[in-house]
Amino acid sequence: PAIATDGAGGAIVTWTDRRGTTSDIYAQRVLASGVVDPAWPVDGTALVTDLLDQSQAQIVFDGTGGAVVTWLDSRSGNADIYAHHVLGNGVVDPAWPVNGRAVCFAAGAQEHPKIAMTGASHAIITWQDLRVGSTYDVYAQRVLLSGIVDPSWPGNGRLLCGATNSQTGPVLASDGAGGAIVAWEDYRAGFVADVYAAHVSAGGAADPSWPLNGLVVCNAAGDQRYPAIVRDAANGAIVTWQDQRAGVPLDIYAQHVLVSGIVDGVWPVNGAAACVASGDQYTPAIATDGAGGAIVTWTDR
C-alpha cells in the first residue's frame, strides 16, 4: 500500500489487489475519526480492473479531497506507466479514460513510478525506463487533472538522464513552480551507486542550467542507494539516502540541492551525516519540517 493525505486529517490509501484473477489497483479513504469513509465503496474503489496485472501503485493528494494514483501496467504485454484520478467522494473521475490514462507506453519496460503534485491542476510522474538498450534511464511526464497528458511535454516523457549504465529508483519533489526535482541511484561509474538529481521545468524541458544527465548529489566511496526527497522552502530539495562510504555498516546522509543546479555550499561535500551510529542504518524516508528543512527516519540496527 501507499498513502496520501486527504487534506482533512484523514488519508487515501492505494494498493495492489488480487481479489480477481489478476492484480488490480484500488483505493480507499479513511477519515480523521478512524473510520472508513461510508461514501466510498466497501473494500475500496477500483481504479483499474484490466485483464492483465497492475502493480507498484503510488499516490498523491490532488488538493481538493481526492488523489492521483500512478502504477505499472501490463495490459499491453509490456510494463507501461498509467495513472487515474479518484475524487474525494470515492468516484473515479469520469473525465479520465476507463482503467486509467496511459502516461508512457514506449518500447521496453517502464517501472517503479513516483508522483508529486506540482500545481493545482497537474502532477509529474517519474520512472526508470528500459526503452533504449539494456540499461535503465530516467524519464518524467506531466499529467493534467483534466485527464490528459500535458501536450507541451514530449510524448512518452522527457528524458532526464541517459548516461551510461543504469539509473534507477527515481524519486521527485515539486519545485514550487510547476516543475520538479528528480533524484535517483546512478551507476554511470560502474558497479558502485551514486546519487544524482535533475530539474524538469513546468514546460517539460530538462533545465539547461543543470549539468547534462544530472547533478552529482553524492559520489563518495561505496554505494549510495535508496534516495528519498522532499521540497525545501526555496524551490530546491533535500535528498537523503543510505550510504556505504565507511564500508560496513551503512549510514544515513542528506544533501541540500538548490534549484539553480548546484548543491548548497553551506552543506558538506557529499552530504551531511544524519546518522553514523554503529550497526546498519538503511532505507530512509523523509518529510518536510515546515521550515525549509526536513525530518528523516530510517531502519536502524
Image: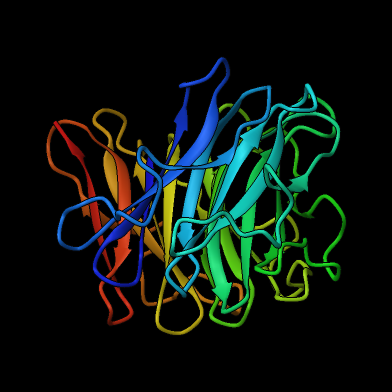
User: Residue shown at 41%/42% (left/top)?
Assistant: 44
Report whether 36 appears left or right of 224.
left
48 to 294, vertically: above or below:
above
Kindly indicate the quadrant of the structure image that contains residue 203: bottom right
Task: Count the numbered circles shown.
Answer: 0
Where residue 101 appears, as percent x and y from the top left, is 73, 50
- Name the quadrant of the C terminus: top left
Kindly indicate the quadrant of the structure image that contains residue 248: top left
Residue 112 is at least partly visible in this image: no
Q: Nearer the viewer, residue 266 or 39?
A: 39
Q: Nearer the viewer, residue 163 or 159?
A: 159
232 to 68, vertically: above or below:
below
Report whether 62 appears left or right of 148.
left
Where residue 277 appears, as percent x and y from the top left, is 13, 42
Report whether 56 appears left or right of 43.
right
Where residue 205 appears, as percent x and y from the top left, is 79, 69
Residue 263 is at least partly visible in this image: yes
Where residue 143 appears, as percent x and y from the top left, is 69, 62
User: Residue shown at 85%/34% (left/top)?
Assistant: 132
User: Residue shown at 66%/38% (left/top)?
Assistant: 188
- Name the quadrant of the N terminus: top left
